[in-house]
Amino acid sequence: MASQVRVRKSELETAELVEFEQAPLADGAIRLEIESFSVTANNITYAVVGDGFGYWNFFPAPDGWGIVPMWGHARVAESNNPEIAVGERVYGYLPMATHLDVMPGKISRGGFTDITDYRQPMSAIYNQYSRLAADPEHDPAREGERMIFGPLFKTGFLIEYFMRANDWFGAGQLILTSASSKTAMGLASVARQNSPAVKRIGLTSNGNVAFVGKTGLYDQVVAYDDIADLAGTPSVSVDFAGNPAVLKSIHTTLGAALKYSCLVGATHVEQRAASLNGDEEMEGPTPTLFFAPDHAVHMFQTLGPEEAGRLMASAWHGFLSDVEGSIAIERNKGLAAALTAYLDTLAGKVNPSRGIVIEP
């Protein structure tokens, strides 16, 4: 018997823990027993924009329901594939569940791709699994940090690469909303490493100003209530919050000085739809949605996998040094804890200083 957390797609606050019988394992397939995954705002983004980007399609559920994707570690519990042994550990895209069957293809020493038919229409980035025994990014002592920060850091890395490739659109100032979020912290860290001349300004709620300041990642921390005080110098903004009022305030304050407006993520869930649909007329550039998988493919094609991987690994180690001690990793046993963590994160109740890891 296996278990999974299902979410009602039309009402994300409705979720339930369900047990189900596993089908016989197909020829060539392996059955993963999920050992651990993190629950972050990134997972909430997957749910909020699920249908628009196909995130609900990775792990099928009954009609009207969805399974929120997670990033984590798993062990091979059963194998009908001669190239992959029982007991091997992997890292990759997993459901909020106890088990997952995958069909490995393109198998190499370092990893494989799930070639199950229903996963093929979506971005290939999400179908790749690392085999930990030969994974250069794997550090047994940092598994928690990799789950919590890894996917979010990579989004931040790709945003910085995109901005730098475009000469920051002529801007000397980077404005990040939801500056306490892990993706924003990743972007701020990479920008500090690779584009130190660009001033980093973190916007956050009054209650998070102290936390954001202590990270040391920003040149200036500004509360949302004080956006009107931003200097009117050429700037780019990266909106992780999805709050249309905040975004409009940035556009109104900077006007023509805002050279590019980037939308990423959705930490203010209830207000994201208006922002995505463009219901608010704003001064300055049209906000543009950033889809990390597409940018990852472009970067790897442009630089080649070896150079792209080297640059990302270098920035990742710098980021780990930057965030050392900034969060306390909490490990929770059982899938019921995942349900609670999901609902708390959806409601914005999780303090940014907490990093939640679930061990189903």
Image (cartoon, grey):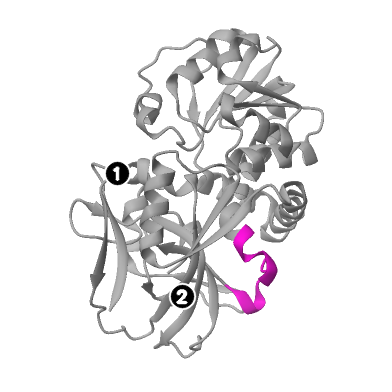
Residue 26 is drawn in which quadrant? bottom left
Count of marks placed on residues: 2
81 in the magenta segment:
no
Q: Which label's residue is closer to the chain start, 1 or 2? A: 1
Magenta part of the protein: which range?
131-145
For label 2, the residue is 105
Direction from residue 31 to residue 325 in the image, left or right? right
Does residue 49 appear to the left or right of 139 in the view shown? Answer: left
* Label 1 sits on residue: 12
Amino acid type, residue under disc 2 in the picture: Gly
In the rendered structure, are the residues bearing label 1 and label 2 in contact, judged by CB atoms less than 8 Å apart?
no
Answer above or below: position of 211 versus 321. above
Q: Is residue 137 magenta?
A: yes
* SS at badge 2: strand
* Residue 17, percent from left and from top: 28, 62
Quadrant into which the C terminus falls: bottom left
For the point 61% across and 37% down, which residue is it? Answer: 184
Residue 25, placed above or below residue 102 = below
Tell which of 327 and 83 is nearer to you.
Answer: 327
